[in-house]
Image: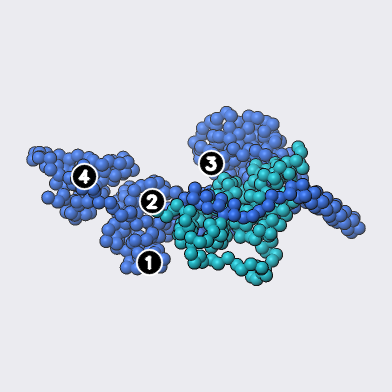
Chain colours: A cyan, B blue
């Protein structure tokens, strides 16, 4: 087994998606890049176990989520210096707001558990079983959280007003 | 919003994130350095520990598990068992079984498929021969009947993960009238972990499989736990059992009702969990509690004008009738029932129906959480969520109705002047259909459990309608009675 080759190929194929997933989960881009690299380094040190796992993606996402939650526990997130103004949660004119910012803002309004299953399932494209494995929860719970998340987003006025959202008649 | 739309939105949002491709080579180099550092730290830690222990003159007792296991590893079951296997266990002890094996797939307490069996030591006396190819792993308390049996077969001990394990050698077993497990046929062997009160035995026509299964017995690693048995327990007890095992359950029990139209079957005790009993999962995992209505579970349905109809099975002559109805806020309502009637009660299981008026603070336009407390089983209440009926779409102009008299046309409900609910169709027809006048009756709109009986006049005009329910014996009995409007 070519550990280095497999690892490099995996990073090249999935690295960007992992970073984007972390951003959609609520981290800034620099933080997301740091955490993804940390997670991948941890995976490398146990790459034989990663490849032996029934599902590599679920395994890696689990490591990433662990890294993210560990990071959250370590830091106090009440105040952070930032060069940019925070995104407003209320769009004054929905049609002038970029879809990406609106979607990220809508995701932030979701409870964390719902946000996580939504991003893993519909952005990272994990199956329900993979999502369940990554989160250590039953498949039924994944389904119910997805259902609730979709309902929440359907009721999100800012998303409903998006020009590209075909949920509005 | 549907799945396609959310995928498109997330895709758009993802593309909007200016994530650069990760430099895989740099990351690989950093990972190698990190791995080397980690190994060095571990070696130094172990060396230091050994030095301290030697200096103190303390014997080092070998422990199981993987001391080099980093804390960041995913808490998944896959890494605990070899590929294609899963861990099942109880009381802190686990065994690896093939992933496709089920749990408690037995008939008359004998494995009928390759399965894991949690043996309670009580067996039904209905001797059957198990299929010759089935293999099984059984787990039971060492102090139970089968545990004691296997303890007596132990001929040597060994140490596994620091625990003392008794080994009963694999050998052919013959059927015994006393021990069901020995009737499985084929070679069987066991390990007994008395310190954990666990006995695990395996049987299969394939002797090497038995040996492999027993060789995989191990301690459940720290941070993991086995899903306990919750079947047959009231919700509170089941929840408590899960919590004691370090697991948690969502707020609501999942009641697996059949789609029975307006009647909603009610659930009581927990019948299982969505993660099978014995599965080894990370501590703190969420496990859903499941319940299923039985054939004789109560059911309920919403009627018009804030009325609720309840159907419970019991003695026909001493039916269970509502005593009180209380609301507890949040659209929750509890109905208490007690048995009415004389001293002598028929021992049948007939459906007894009652109609109650819902308290004024219950919003019938919203889902209602109904709890039913039967006097003889107060600690095992039934519950269900009743959803308001969907708005009725009026028939389009010009549409014809197949029946001139249907439930919508009922003028009188619940047999004020007709046969009592529960009267068999044959008896009702004898009293209400006068064939000398040319009357006859027809059954219509028949489903598995409900039907209508229309009494037709000599000219074919319907005059009376019975709504019918099918009883457990397969016969039809009157549920409600009405006169067709002219």
| Picture residue at 31% right of the left edge, 48% below the top | B350
Height in image: B117 above or below B171?
A: below
Extreme front residue here?
A96
In whole angstroms, how far apart are the C-alphas of marks 1 and 2? 20 Å
Residue B327 numbered tag: 1
First of labels 4, 3 by sequence position = 3
Badge 1: how crowded within 10 Å, few (<14), some, or many (20+)? some
Secondary structure beneath dot 4 equals: loop
Secondary structure beneath dot 1 equals: strand
In whole angstroms, how far apart are the C-alphas of marks 4 and 3? 60 Å
Residue B265 numbered tag: 2
With B404 as the anchor, is B354 left or right in this view?
right
Residue A148 at x, y percent in the picture: 49, 56
Q: Chain of mark 3?
A: B
Badge 4: how crowded within 10 Å, few (<14), some, or many (20+)? few
Task: Say whether mark 3 and mark 2 are on the same chain.
Answer: yes
| Residue with the mark numbered 3 | B123
| Residue with the mark numbered 4 | B399
């Amino acid at each position: 087994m070519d550990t280095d080759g497999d690892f490099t190929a995996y990073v090249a194929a999935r690295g960007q998606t992992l970073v984007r997933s972390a951003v959609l989960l609520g981290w800034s881009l620099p933080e997301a890049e740091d955490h993804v690299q940390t997670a991948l380094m941890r995976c490398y040190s146990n790459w034989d176990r990663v490849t032996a796992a029934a599902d590599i993606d679920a395994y890696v996402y689990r490591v990433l989520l662990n890294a993210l939650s560990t990071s959250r526990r370590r830091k106090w997130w009440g105040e952070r210096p930032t060069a940019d103004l925070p995104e407003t949660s209320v769009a004054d004119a929905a049609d002038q707001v970029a879809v990406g910012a609106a979607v990220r803002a809508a995701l932030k309004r979701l409870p964390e558990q719902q946000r996580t299953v939504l991003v893993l399932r519909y952005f990272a494209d994990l199956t329900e079983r993979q999502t369940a494995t990554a989160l250590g929860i039953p498949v039924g719970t994944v389904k119910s959280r997805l259902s609730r998340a979709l309902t929440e987003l359907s009721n999100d006025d800012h998303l409903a007003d998006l020009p590209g959202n075909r949920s509005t008649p | 919003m549907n799945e396609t739309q959310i995928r498109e939105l997330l895709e758009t949002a993802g593309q909007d994130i200016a994530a650069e491709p990760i430099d895989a080579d740099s990351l690989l180099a950093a990972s190698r350095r990190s791995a080397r550092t980690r190994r060095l730290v571990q070696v130094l830690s172990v060396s230091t520990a050994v030095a301290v222990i030697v200096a103190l003159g303390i014997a080092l007792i070998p422990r199981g598990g993987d001391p080099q296991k980093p804390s960041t590893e995913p808490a998944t079951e896959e890494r605990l068992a070899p590929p294609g296997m899963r861990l099942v266990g109880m009381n802190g002890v686990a065994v690896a079984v093939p992933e496709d094996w089920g749990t408690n797939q037995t008939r008359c307490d004998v494995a009928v498929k390759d399965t894991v069996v949690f043996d309670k030591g009580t067996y039904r006396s209905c001797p059957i021969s198990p299929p010759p190819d089935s293999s099984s792993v059984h787990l039971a308390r060492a102090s139970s009947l089968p545990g004691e049996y296997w303890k007596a077969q132990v001929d040597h001990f060994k140490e596994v993960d620091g625990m003392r394990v008794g080994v009963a050698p694999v050998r052919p077993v013959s059927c015994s009238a006393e021990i069901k497990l020995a009737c499985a046929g084929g070679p069987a062997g066991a390990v007994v972990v008395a310190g954990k009160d666990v006995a695990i035995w395996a049987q299969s026509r394939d002797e090497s499989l038995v040996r492999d299964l027993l060789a995989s017995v191990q301690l459940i690693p720290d941070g993991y736990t086995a899903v306990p048995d919750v079947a047959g327990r009231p919700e509170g007890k089941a929840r408590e059992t899960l919590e004691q095992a370090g697991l948690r359950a969502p707020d609501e029990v999942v009641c697996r009702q059949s789609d029975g139209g307006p009647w909603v079957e009610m659930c009581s005790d927990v019948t299982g969990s969505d993660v099978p009993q014995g599965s080894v999962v990370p501590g703190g995992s969420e496990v859903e509690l499941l319940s299923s209505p039985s054939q004789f579970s109560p059911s309920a349905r919403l009627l018009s004008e804030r009325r609720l109809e309840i159907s419970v099975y019991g003695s026909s002559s001493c039916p269970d009738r509502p005593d009180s109805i209380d609301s507890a806020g949040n659209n929750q309502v509890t109905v208490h029932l007690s048995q009415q009637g004389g001293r002598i009660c028929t021992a049948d299981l007939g459906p007894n129906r009652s109609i109650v008026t819902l308290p004024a603070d219950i919003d019938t336009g919203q889902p209602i959480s109904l709890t039913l407390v039967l006097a003889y089983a107060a600690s095992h209440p039934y519950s269900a969520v009743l959803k308001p009926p969907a708005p009725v779409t009026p028939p389009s102009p010009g549409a014809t109705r197949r029946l001139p008299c249907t439930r919508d046309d009922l003028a009188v409900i619940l047999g004020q002047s007709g046969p009592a609910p529960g009267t068999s169709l044959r008896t009702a027809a004898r009293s209400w259909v006068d064939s000398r006048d040319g009357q006859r009756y027809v059954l219509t709109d028949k489903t598995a459990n409900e039907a209508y009986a229309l009494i037709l006049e000599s000219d074919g005009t319907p005059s009376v309608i019975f709504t019918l329910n099918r009883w457990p014996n397969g016969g039809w009995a009157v549920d409600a009675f009405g006169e067709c409007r002219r």
